[in-house]
Amino acid sequence: MAKRADFVWMDGKIVPWDQATVHVSADTVLRGGNVFEGMRAYWNEDERELYIFKNAEHLRRLRQSAKIMRMSFPYTDAEFTEAFIQLIRRNKFTDSVHFRPVVYFDTGEPGGYLPEEIRTGAFVLAYSRPHAKSVYSGVHTCISTWRRNSDTAMPPRIKAAANYHNSRLAHVEARVNGFHTPILLNDRGKISESSGSCIMLVRDGVVITPPVTADILESITRVTLINLFRAELGVDVVERDVDRTEAYISDEAFFCGSGQEVTPILTVDHYPLGDGKVGPLTKKIQDLYFEITKGKVAKYRHWLTPVYQHVGAK
Ligand SMILES: Cc1ncc(COP(=O)(O)O)c(C=O)c1O
């Protein structure tokens, strides 16, 4: 992997990028045994400050993923938060950052499956990641021929690296076929989510999104936007099963996630949504999301954790 930052946080220490390694016999290598989070810190140029967005919510979901895996959790939330802050500071990021805390099964008994037979470790990778161009220009998407892995087999609710094998199949297929990213149906034939984000449609001024029982990751951005639609834009949001053909006739639609942020969907299977341009409600919620994540809305500053002014940080 190309070097993307100078330092990595690994098992309690900040180490140079090249020294952040695990052994090839580690369970995380052999079986994809890890859980992780994808988080962002947003740069506020006026304040020259980076703000971690919804830190507590991400740490909670990381713990929940580990719980379902029956993994021990090697650090407290305070220790992880301090690790994020120190790592971002050490890399001297002054632009928006995407970072990935990972709790992983390391080496253990040969063939060992039980958590007590395997050492559990943790690391955090951080990258500079400004907005992608597609958040402004929008994307073309398709219904994947691959189905989303199901809660009865490999629960998407666990943010586990191994789940992204399913995402990879669907994503690569979409790209090979000339689309930006896929929409996956679940095993009941209803829309679940994309390879790395959730989906929302707009029909007749109402936002519709698949429920948390549709084989989706319980997305933090999804909940954030549902609340903002209701509280700030006075827009109804309905969480219910969504048919594939509803996507074709929706007025607008977008993907949402920490990585994808709010990414407008222009077409689905070549059907243009609305006039085939970025939808007005999509633009409105995106503007609001960006204002809030960058710390420009006082009411929502409690969703943010400052990096450079952090009390107690050196
Ligand atoms: C499969 C999948 N669904 C949904 C999301 C969105 O989740 P969140 O908003 O918590 O980032 C992500 C990305 O993080 C994802 O990988």
Image (cartoon, helix red, strand yellow):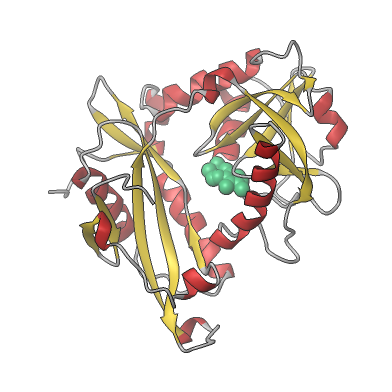
Q: In the rendered image of this protein, does residue 258 appear above or below residue 252?
A: below
Q: Position of residue 215 (x, y in %)?
A: 72, 52
Q: In this rendering, would 116 be left or right of 155?
A: left
The residue sitting at the front extreme is: 176
Outermost top residue: 275
The part of the image, by quadrant, that contains residue 277 is top right
At a point 49% along the width and 23% down the height, the residue shown is: 133
Q: Residue 19 is drawn in which quadrant?
A: bottom left
Residue 27 vertical position relative to residue 135 in the rendered view, above or below: below
In front here: 213 or 254? 254
Above or below 66: residue 275: above
Q: Position of residue 308 (x, y in %)?
A: 21, 38
Task: Tally the numbered discs.
Answer: 0
In depth, the one of 101 and 218 nearer the eye is 101
Dividing the image into four equal quarters, which quarter contains ligand 1? top right
Q: Residue at x 52, y 73 (%)?
A: 30
Residue 100 spot, x, y in % from top left: 41, 51
The residue nearer to you, when weighing 7 against 224, is: 7
Res 50 seen here:
yes
Instruction: Please give left or right for residue 158 compared with residue 3 in the image.
Output: right
Q: Quadrant of residue 103?
A: bottom left
**Horizontal side of residue 39 vs 48, given as left or right:** right
Of the pair 296 and 109, the residue shown nearer to us: 109
Report whether residue 238 is seen: no
Find the residue positioned furthest to the bottom: 109
